[in-house]
Amino acid sequence: MSDHDDSPPQDEKNEEPQSPSASGSENSGADTTEQQPEANPFEQAGRNPLGGSGGTGGAGTAHAARRTFAPGRAERTYEISGDGQVFEGNYFIGQFGPDSSPPVVQGSVPLEALKHLADVYCEASGYHRMKQLLRTDGLLVLCGESGSGRKATALALLSELADNQVTRLDPSHAVHEITEQMIEAGAGHLLELPPDDGRREPERHRGETRKEPRRPSRLSELHLDRFSELLRKSNAYGVVLVESGDLADRLLRGRYGMYCPPAPAEEVLHRHLRVLLKSEPEGALDSARALAGRSDVTEALGLDELRPREAARLADHLARRQKGELTDEQLLDDCATFVRAQARAWFAGADRPGMLPEALPTLSAAAFRIAVAVFNGSAYSLTAEAAELLAWELAVTLDPEQPVGRRLFGTHAEIRPMVARSVLEDGEIDLGDARVPMRAIRFQGESLATAVLREVWHGYHNVRGPMARWLRILCDDPRPEIWVRASIAAGVLCSWDWIYGFGELVRPMAALDNPVPQMAAATALAEAARDPKVQPAVKSLVKEWAKSDDDALLATAVLAHGYVLPAGSVSASLDALVSVVRRQKDDDVDVLGTASFSVMRLLASGEPETVTGRLADWLKDGRRKLANLVLISMIGTLTMRTTYLWGLREVPELEPYDAQPLLVALLATRPQLAPELAALLRHTLATARAGETALDELGSLLRRASRNEEALRLVCDFLPLLAEQRRDRDRLRSLLEDLVRDRDRPLNRAAASRMWDAVGEGADR
């Protein structure tokens, strides 16, 4: 890829001698022979095979996507037995979400449970204002995330005002269905609404129509006013719990709604530990709290901040460790279940009642969580759009006969991340040429992304089809910020189930006559090959495709070898690439261009010594095809920016030079390679069929270097190595003269003078 700021416009280059097809079929065979080398193979030397500038995106995008699925995250298994309920303190916690088990019938909360709550409860911010509103209106609506301590806060408020007489109302009843007979005089009443706004309808089957009028699906202030009046008549109190979302957002703007922020996790942990360890020797409490902050424990938890419910669970595990009931390994295993439990709670029964449009809200929430897993840390706008595409795929799979649309003014962008336990924050996205600001979304826990994909992929087979179609659509998007993320996620899924992933993800993309999905397929193959158990299958497949007569499969195999992982080593990857080039009957422009791109990526893979040594061997081999591969690759190093040559293994030393051409980056990070690089470039400049293009691209590199002091120093140290012979010096000085005399873009004279002197130093060596 040429630097479009410094090199002649592409259109001007295309005005050079035309190919036979452009100049007419009447040209003689001799003319055809003379013109063929112009178009083949150096016309596109140094260009990105994906097309326009930055087709592969910036290295920052790829590395961020790779870190999302770093090995070892959320890979511990978690089995939930029985009905998926965990009893903690004074109430049951449903691990599978509020709709996973039969509704709890109306009944009083045991006195001992309320007393235990009084011992461990940590007041949420705004507790006293909540109590005042409850006294005034008799009714309070508490909104917040699941596990945030809303229920504990509600029970604490009601037990304080109603003298420990608290009744839980049956959540299968909507607020407008509560009657005066259901209200106990002087008591507190707790009603927890499910996320679907309290609506309960019989499940329909395909083809059936509704026989009864639909119940009101939107809880309104009118319903709450009626409930408040019933409570005040009986000198009673009521708290309604609503999970964050559209309904909560609307109720918070009304008379009865208040947001219940989570209490500080450290304080909740301390209070629970104090109760659990009250019979233990002195120092046990401090030891348990120190254990909670240990790096291996926090890493196993995989969450940025624990919610009160999780802090209470962790306190139980820590207390058991202090009592000798658990080993350190068992403690870490228990801590690793927190993320898996969150993922399981998100997706269990997410398609109930099984028909649209009733199931669409929960399907949309599930799609958003999966999209955040794939785009974790990326732009919110891209994530939200990807989530809508996935929601459509899920919806048409669930109910093919029901038309699907999008809500235009649904959940606000500031509220929607709560559905996925994520946050919005300011960030930058790497475009390769530049970094631009973005509004990013990320999980509040580095292990959540892997846990979400693992839960869906392994837990729900019928979701695989729509997910595979969705990822293929994303991998066909020319924007690297989308296809890079999707392809790496696809590779992770393939590593978990190679047979299915290859057939539904990789093979369909590789077969497309489009370089973007081919590159995406190659990326997915390389990512899957990271797993040692899958790598042999990937290696065998890529070897087979490299011999294929299908141009698309061949191109995918060549691109895959630029990642090192499929072949297992840089040396093996180079062997595979040269084997492909040797098998071509003629100098195939596309194959050579794609192979040279992979060679450049191998140069940037952290083992450039292996690559430069092999390039020199290919030149000594004497075969024209191998020589052309070397020539095209060296031309590419002059202008291809390092950021576009990212691999799936990070090379930290190259990161400061992402914006520089690969040659400059190598000179900065591998100065010992300068003589070998100079020998390869001298040969390229001196070869008739490649020299003109190489000289033009070297001019582009010199122009760029003149604007950067460090790059200028590196180039000036390198030029003497290019000027060993008089002919070399004459060629370089002629180039410098042309650059300085350029009427449109004259080279800076001070920089040119330094380069001129550096060229002269070559005579003294």
Image: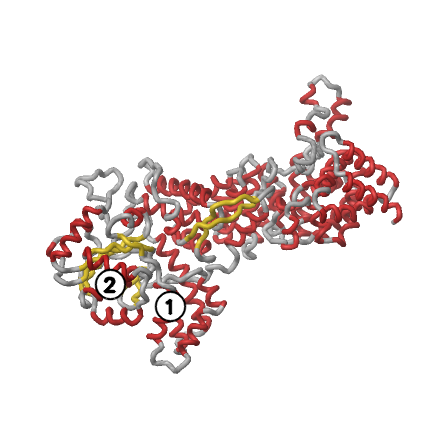
In-image side of 503 versus 127 (left or right): right
Could you tell me how far apart the alpha carbons at marks 2 and 1 are, in whole angstroms?
A: 19 Å
**Can you give x and y, in whole percent of width and height, for residue 28 in the image?**
75, 19
The residue located at (70%, 41%) in the rendering is 704
Please give the label number shown on residue 227: none
**Can you give x and y, in whole percent of width and height, for residue 321 in the image?**
41, 75
Q: In the displayed structure, would residue 4 be above or below residue 561?
A: above
Which residue carries the number 2 mark? 157
Residue 698 seen in render: yes
- Quadrant of the rendered structure where residue 629 is? top right
Residue type at mark 2 is Leu
Residue type at mark 1 is Glu
Q: Nearer the viewer, residue 434 or 665?
A: 434
Question: Circle 1: is it few (<14), some (14-19), or many (20+) Cα within 10 Å?
Answer: some
Q: Nearer the viewer, residue 397 or 487?
A: 487
Dot 2 lies on which element? Answer: helix
**Can you give x and y, in whole percent of width and height, for residue 634 in the image?**
73, 42
